[in-house]
Image: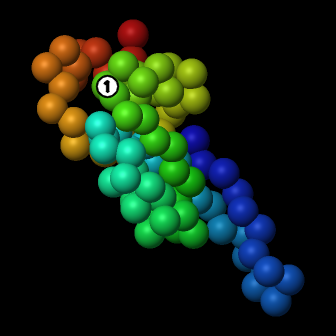
Amino acid sequence: MARVVLRRADQRKPVVMDRVLFVDDEPNVLDGIRRQLRNRVEIETATSAAAGLSLIKAQGPFAVVVSTCVCRKWTVRDSSPR
């Protein structure tokens, strides 16, 4: 789901920000991604596959899910809607 963010008074059109979930087991990587993209997309982060799945179930849908984890127990079937 996207959220609407209002721009400054001199810019009339609202901006729709997509929600993106980043899953990585390195918190420093997630912090860097958050800093680089904070004004472009709404970012949620998780440090494990289980935490990522919990976020998808609790706060989904997300426009994009980016996972750099090697998640042996996480399959495509696990992330699809039931």
Q: Nearer the viewer, residue 74 or 8?
A: 74
Q: Residue at x 14, y 20 (%)?
A: 72
Q: Please say if 58 is above or below 7.
A: above
Query: Residue at the right extreme?
Result: 9
Residue receiving disc 1: 49
Q: Please say if 45 is above or below 78.
A: below
Give residue 21's position: percent from left, percent from top: 43, 42
For the residue labelled by badge 1, is the local secondary structure a helix, a strand or a loop? helix
Which quarter of the figure has residue 10?
bottom right
Give residue 30's position: percent from left, percent from top: 39, 51
Q: In this orientation, does residue 63 appear?
A: no
> Identity of the amino acid at label 1?
Ala
Give residue 34's position: percent from left, percent from top: 47, 58
Q: Residue at x 50, y 27 (%)?
A: 55
Q: Please say if 37 is above or below 78.
A: below
- Quadrant position of the C terminus in the picture: top left
How would you rate the neighbour count of disc 1 (Cα within 10 Å): few for under 14, some for 14-19, many for 20 or more? many
Q: Residue at x 50, y 33 (%)?
A: 61
